[in-house]
Amino acid sequence: EDKVVQSPLSLVVHEGDTVTLNCSYEVTNFRSLLWYKQEKKAPTFLFMLTSSGIEKKSGRLSSILDKKELSSILNITATQTGDSAIYLCAVVSGNQFYFGTGTSLTVIP
Amino acid sequence: DSGVTQTPKHLITATGQRVTLRCSPRSGDLSVYWYQQSLDQGLQFLIHYYNGEERAKGNILERFSAQQFPDLHSELNLSSLELGDSALYFCASSVEPAGGPIPQYFGAGTRLSVL
């Protein structure tokens, strides 16, 4: 059974801290891994990863895929209160998307 | 604004009823995906259509059905509603089918409350 597991489930940090969110997967036909940020509404796309070891970066956010370890991490440096959200990891296996349950990040001023 | 439009935003109905949720994808996108998000189960993939044809089915109940029309908008029909069907239903679209180099973009969702 294909599955995606994210950890931790929840994280509370102070502004300025650096956080690392984890996503591990077990799927039969891996094609890509995606990270989304969900605030009070629809998930918004952050990164798509298909190749191992190549870091994707956008401002204070970065992500990397490790196909050998079947995992990905999302790093956020110098966190801000606006980073508070649920971060979702999704893996495309065949024609289907499998989402993890997300990591809830709360950044305290 | 992702460009994906979902209507209605909120829907309150009673058990046993039938409802239709509508999704208009971004201009040019051929793929439409439906998801259900409930508090205890996270985001669950329901079904995927590409250019009018069903491409993949996820955890979609037999009481649920969907279709994609020639103008590429899609409808998700939920019948014989139960309390447990209360959830946020998202539609997402992309240019290509799953696995292509283009990610999905999500609509704002329809919140369904079954009383």
Image (cartoon, grey):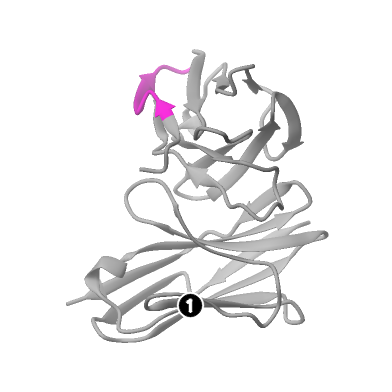
Residue A95's spot in the image, x, y percent? Answer: 75, 46
Residue B90's spot in the image, x, y percent? Answer: 49, 38
Q: Nearer the viewer, residue A57 or A13?
A: A57
Q: Residue at x 51, y 13 (%)?
A: B18
Residue extending farthest top = B17
Q: Is residue A18 above or below residue B102?
A: below
Residue B50's spot in the image, x, y percent? Answer: 70, 32
In which image quadrant can residue B31 be found? top right
Residue A21's spot in the image, x, y percent? Answer: 49, 76
Q: Is residue B14 magenta?
A: yes
* Image quarter hosting the N terminus of chain A: bottom right
Q: Nearer the viewer, residue B82 or A69?
A: A69
Q: Circle 1 — which element?
A: strand
Q: Is residue B27 left or right of residue A38?
A: right
Of helix, strand and loop, which mostly describes the magenta segment? Answer: strand
Q: Which residue is mark 1?
A: A62
Residue extending farthest right = A28
Q: Is residue B102 magenta?
A: no
**Residue B28 appearing in the image:** yes
Range of magenta residues? B6-15
Label 1 resides on the chain identified as A
Q: Which class describes the residues within 10 Å of circle 1: few (<14), some (14-19), or many (20+)?
A: some
Kind of residue indicated by mark 1: Ser
Q: Residue at x 31, y 86 (%)?
A: A17
Q: Nearer the viewer, residue B100 or A73?
A: B100
Q: Is residue B54 left or right of residue B65?
A: right
Residue extending farthest front = B28
**Residue B16 appearing in the image:** no
Q: Is residue B103 above or below residue B11?
A: below
* Image quarter hosting the C terminus of chain A: bottom left
Q: Residue at x 70, y 23 (%)?
A: B52
